[in-house]
């Protein structure tokens, strides 16, 4: 049962990484580490800015 649980957790982590589930947490950690005196965006402001940036510069998106 332990192997199955680890496999499910690994798949969940992988899919979450592809979907960007960990991006806000990484942003907060980055800000704390490299810019400790600057304010951190709220999660909703972070995602609004990220999507606006993607719309301005679509890059290699498929859609």
Image (cartoon, rainbow, N blue to C red):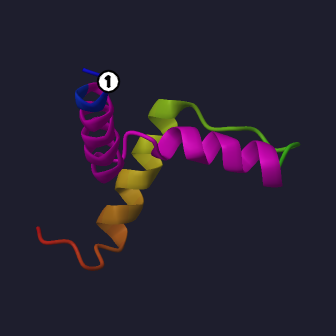
Identify which residue, 5 or 41, lies in the foreground: 5
Indicate the position of residue 44 as horizontal and vertical percent values.
Answer: 45, 32
Identify which residue, 31 or 51, lies in the foreground: 31
- Please tell me whether residue 1 is drawn above or below residue 56 in the rendered image: above
Residue 6 appears left or right of 31: left
Indicate the position of residue 38 as horizontal and vertical percent values.
Answer: 81, 44
Q: Dividing the image into 4 quarters, which one contains the N terminus?
A: top left
Indicate the position of residue 24 as horizontal and vertical percent values.
Answer: 51, 41
Identify which residue, 3 or 11, lies in the foreground: 3
Q: Which quadrant holds residue 55? A: bottom left
- Please tell me whether residue 51 is drawn above or below residue 11 in the rendered image: below
Please provide the residue range marked out in magenta.
5-34
Q: Residue at x 30, y 78 (%)?
A: 59
- Please tell me whether residue 20 is drawn above or below residue 43 in the rendered image: below
Residue 54 appears left or right of 45: left
Q: Secondary structure at mark 1?
A: helix
Q: Residue furthest left?
A: 63
Q: Residue at x 29, y 52 (%)?
A: 18
Q: Residue furthest bottom?
A: 60
Residue 9 on the magenta span: yes
How packed mark 1 is, by other alpha carbons closer than 10 Å (few <14, some 14-19, many 20 or more), is few
The residue identified by callout 1 is 2
Q: Residue at x 35, y 53 (%)?
A: 51
């Amino acid at each position: 049962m332990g192997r199955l649980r680890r496999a499910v957790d690994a798949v969940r982590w992988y899919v979450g990484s592809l979907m960007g589930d960990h991006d806000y947490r990484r942003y907060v950690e980055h800000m704390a580490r490299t810019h400790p005196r600057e304010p951190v965006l709220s999660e909703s402001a972070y995602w609004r800015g990220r999507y606006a940036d993607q719309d301005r510069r679509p890059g290699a998106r498929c859609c």
